[in-house]
Image: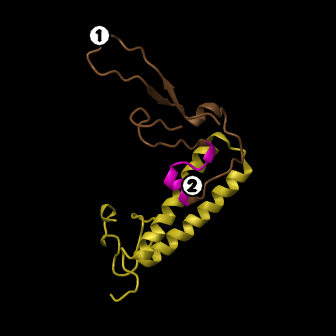
Chain colours: A yellow, B brown
Amino acid sequence: MATANQPGDKRFYELLEKLQAVDFVLVELNLYLDTHPTDVNAINQFNQQTEQRWAIAQEFESLYGPLLNFGHSYSGYPWQWNNVPWPWQV
Amino acid sequence: MYSQIRVYYPYISPFDPCPPIRVKTYQVNPQLFIGFQPENLPQFTPMEALRRGVLWPALYSPYSGRGDQEGLEG
């Protein structure tokens, strides 16, 4: 278990913060698009952010294990879902 | 741009047992004056938006504590 990236290191928090920021933009755009369904620029931005979110989540999960359970993320070996830190320990 | 914090001066009863609060403030939020949000408004960067709690500067409402306590801010 001598991996370079341990949960809780600097990169861990960088990626989580980036993910949080992109997620927030997505929430805002989602709500905005509910009332502005024909704003092409916003839809393009929404799709770009979605792609970026996916890339960040992908990188995070490859380093630190799944973000979601019940089949929405992959796990490495051994099983990573119940690794620390728990969400309230982050 | 108008101030988002507005002020009124309540009536002070001569029989008020408590020390009077002569100046009271309330907040008016920017969305009240926008009506339907226009398209292509300028945006904060994602990090900045996360800190401020809103993506569009036009809808940002600052909060610096209760304005009726010390030195009023606009």
Position in image of residue A18 (x %, y %) = 51, 65
B74 vs A6: above or below: above
Give the residue pinned by disc 1.
Answer: B15
Q: Amino acid at mark 1?
A: Phe
The answer for which chain carries disc 1 is: B
Magenta-colored segment: predominant secondary structure? helix
- Please identify, in this view, whether the residue under mark 1 or under mark 2 is nearer the observer: 1
The N terminus of chain B, quarter of image: top right
A85 vs B6: above or below: below
Question: To which quarter of the image does residue A78 belong?
Answer: bottom left
For mark 1, give the secondary structure: loop
The answer for which chain carries disc 2 is: A
Q: Are marks 1 and 2 on the same chain?
A: no
User: Residue B62: which disc?
Assistant: none
Of residues B65 and B54, the one nearer the viewer is: B65
Position in image of residue B43 (x %, y %) = 64, 52
Of residues A61 and B11, the one nearer the viewer is: B11
Whether A45 is among the magenta residues is: no
Q: Is residue B22 left or right of residue A35?
A: left
Residue at 47% over, 70% down: A14
**Label 1: few (<14), some (14–19) or many (≥20) C-alpha neighbours in 10 Å:** few
For mark 2, give the secondary structure: helix
The C terminus of chain B, quarter of image: top right
Q: Residue furthest bottom?
A: A2
Count of numbered circles on the image: 2
Give the residue pinned by disc 2.
Answer: A25
Residue at 67% over, 34% down: B36
Residue at 46% over, 20% down: B9
A54 vs B54: above or below: below
Which stretch appears magenta? B47-58
Position in image of residue A35 (x %, y %) = 64, 39
Q: Is residue A1 left or right of residue A58?
A: left
